[in-house]
């Protein structure tokens, strides 16, 4: 007897059977990673059965996997209308929403998945990832821990937990978490890579490189591991090897903006400045809103003296999420140099380092001269010193309540507001002054002047990102110092490796515990004949006081010292001593010794 295909129930049943067979085939292709073929079959299923839940759901998953999260959400929303009670679709929808940066909606989607399936470990892991992006690290950790409780062998959750702990600077716990992920999954290249980053932050550079190498051995096309290996080699000043790593990362991933940015940094350190600029530009072409690349480009432009372009790019720092200085949020508008300040009150607030605050506090008088009442906010160590600054009506300690004001401006945005060029840098020196009473006390402490006094600063903060290039060991400095002078340490803090040397040299006076703030340091500086300093806050202080200061600079200095000159338009009394070879302080210090002999 022949089958009656004209019967609509039979036809519908045949369609369901056909669609189910196609779905099983599509699922196998999808699991094998053959996404194009799987996508075609899912689409064919939907032509037969437009309300096929699984085809809509997994077509959405493929859209997410192929970087079309908007389409993914649309397809999954259609599927949810058909069946709103499947936890997995809310989990996958959350991933797509996260990729769209719709973080609140992603969390809501994950919450729905958990409501439907409270033991869903993967959702807790994914939920933790969103909290990590939002920098709610404690919440992220709680979610990773919950995922691990539900599934103790969850290597990915241990890996993600390690990243959150690293961001919290709990490096030992982070390493333990990465190690657990690797124990559970010995071929986990990503965990080795992340472990390398934690070791790098701990300054265990050889171990970090070994971890990156293991990641690459497991996954030879791992562009991210090559990039991180290059960053580590940069810190070690192995610049050629670092460039080779970044080039390899770019070869593996041609649109790798971060690798281009990092490559630009190394090329700059090599003083290959045109190539560095081209590398930054390539990163920005690939990601036009890449704030860190814009920031690095600004530093290079300013180093080259291209202030007009440089100040504009410098403003990108406020769009960089990981910029060291937190962006202030005020209801009052940012002053950009265009609005009249006559009869207005403006808050100038410090940012970045103490040396930056000293350097750019000079603009306070210029702002005041525009008719403004100037409130200056600064860190506590600077307040007594800044009380000598012209143009400031009121000083406020950072973190204290601020009186009402009409406009605000970060100190390092003032050069842009005033359209500062090299020939218009405000360089009226001195603009800061020491306290006569404190200077008198220091004069008594130092005793009768029987030989020239030389102030010394050989190291800055260990947390400065370029500390390994700008600081010098005391032992390296003193072997170049002639005997016929009185040397006075102007260091507020002395590193462990310098303490023994300083103790063994009673001829170098040191007043670490008596330098309570910068007004004490300023008074002591005023009694020096010459101040010799690496690029740190005391160098700026000496320059602002109008003291003769010899500044020791690495091969590629900070942007403010420009290139190929031994003077500074910022500080007329400064003399610059530059490395001619990367890392060569001996050459610099021999020139200093020669000049000291001629005093």
Image (cartoon, rainbow, N blue to C red):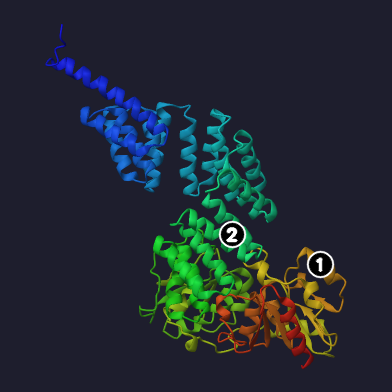
Residue 528 image point, x, y percent: 74, 86
| Residue for point 54% across, 33% down | 146
Give the SS element for disc 1. Answer: helix
Answer left or right for 103 relative to 53: right
Residue 298 image point, x, y percent: 48, 72
Give the SS element for disc 2. Answer: helix
Q: Quadrant of residue 157?
A: top right
Would residue 125 be visible to someone looking at this image? yes
**Crowd rating for badge 2 (residues with CA inside 10 Å; few <14, some 14–19, many 20+):** many
Rendered view: 485 above or below 89: below
Rendered view: 217 above or below 440: above
First reached walking from the N terminus: tag 1 or tag 2 = 2
| Residue for point 47% across, 61% down | 320
Q: Residue furthest left?
A: 6
The residue that label 2 is drawn on is 231
Residue 216 image point, x, y percent: 58, 48
Would residue 328 be visible to someone looking at this image? no
The residue that label 1 is drawn on is 499
Residue 599 image point, x, y percent: 77, 93
Q: Quadrant of residue 85?
A: top left
Q: Residue furthest front?
A: 1
Depth check: give the residue in front, 294 or 62.
62
Q: Quadrant of residue 450?
A: bottom right
Q: Residue furthest top?
A: 1
The span from disc 1 to disc 2 (Cα, nearest Å) is 31 Å
**Crowd rating for badge 1 (residues with CA inside 10 Å; few <14, some 14–19, many 20+):** few
């Amino acid at each position: 007897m022949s089958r009656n295909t004209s019967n609509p129930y039979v036809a519908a049943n045949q369609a369901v059977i056909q669609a189910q067979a196609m779905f099983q085939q599509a699922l196998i292709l999808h699991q094998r990673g053959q996404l194009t073929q799987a996508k075609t079959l899912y689409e064919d299923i939907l032509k037969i059965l437009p309300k096929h839940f699984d085809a809509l759901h997994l077509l959405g998953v493929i859209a997410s996997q192929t970087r079309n999260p908007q389409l993914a959400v649309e397809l999954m929303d259609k599927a949810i209308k058909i069946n709103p009670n499947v936890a997995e679709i809310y989990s996958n929808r959350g991933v797509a929403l996260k990729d769209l940066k719709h973080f609140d909606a992603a969390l809501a989607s994950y919450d729905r998945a958990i409501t439907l399936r409270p033991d869903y470990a993967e959702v807790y892991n994914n939920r933790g990832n969103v909290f990590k992006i939002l920098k709610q690290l404690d919440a992220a950790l709680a979610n990773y821990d919950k995922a691990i409780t539900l599934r103790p062998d969850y290597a990915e959750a241990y890996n993600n937990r390690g990243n959150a702990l690293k961001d919290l600077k709990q490096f030992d716990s982070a390493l333990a978490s990465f190690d657990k992920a690797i124990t559970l999954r010995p071929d986990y290249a990503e965990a080795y890579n992340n472990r390398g980053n934690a070791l790098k932050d701990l300054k265990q550079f050889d171990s970090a490189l070994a971890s990156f190498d293991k990641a690459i051995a497991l996954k030879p096309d791992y562009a991210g591991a090559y990039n991180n290996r290059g960053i580590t080699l940069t810190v070690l000043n192995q610049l050629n090897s670092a460039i080779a790593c970044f080039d390899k990362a770019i070869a593996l991933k041609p649109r790798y903006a971060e690798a281009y940015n990092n490559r630009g940094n190394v090329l700059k350190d090599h003083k290959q400045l045109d190539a560095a600029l081209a590398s930054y530009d390539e990163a920005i072409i690939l990601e036009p809103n890449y704030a860190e690349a814009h920031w690095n480009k600004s530093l290079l432009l300013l180093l080259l003296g291209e202030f007009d372009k440089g100040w504009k790019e410098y403003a990108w720092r406020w769009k960089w999420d990981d910029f060291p200085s937190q962006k202030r949020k005020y209801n009052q508008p940012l002053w950009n140099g265009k609005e009249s300040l006559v009869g207005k009150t403006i808050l100038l607030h410090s940012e970045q380092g103490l040396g930056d605050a000293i350097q750019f506090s000079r603009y306070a008088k210029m702002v005041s001269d525009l008719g403004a009442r100037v409130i200056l906010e600064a860190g506590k160590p600077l307040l007594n010193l800044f009380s000598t600054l012209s143009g400031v009506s009121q000083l406020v300690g950072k973190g204290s309540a601020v009186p009402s004001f009409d406009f605000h401006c970060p100190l390092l945005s003032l050069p842009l507001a005033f359209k500062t060029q090299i020939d218009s840098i405000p360089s009226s020196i001195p603009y800061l002054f020491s306290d006569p009473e404190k200077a008198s006390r220091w004069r008594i402490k130092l005793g009768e002047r029987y030989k020239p006094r030389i102030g010394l600063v050989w190291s800055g903060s260990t947390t400065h990102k370029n500390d390994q290039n700008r600081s010098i060991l005391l032992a390296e400095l003193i072997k170049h110092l002639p005997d016929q002078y009185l040397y006075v340490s102007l260091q507020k803090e002395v590193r462990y490796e310098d303490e023994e040397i300083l103790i063994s040299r009673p001829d170098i006076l040191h007043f670490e515990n008596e330098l309570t703030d910068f007004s004490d340091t300023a008074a002591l500086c005023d009694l020096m004949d010459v101040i010799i300093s690496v690029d740190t806050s005391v160098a700026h202080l000496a320059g602002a006081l109008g003291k003769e200061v010899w500044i020791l600079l690495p091969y590629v200095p900070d942007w403010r010292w420009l290139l190929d000159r031994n003077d500074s338009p910022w500080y007329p009394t400064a003399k610059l001593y530059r490395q001619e070879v990367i890392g060569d302080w001996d050459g610099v210090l021999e020139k200093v010794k020669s000049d000291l002999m001629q005093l």
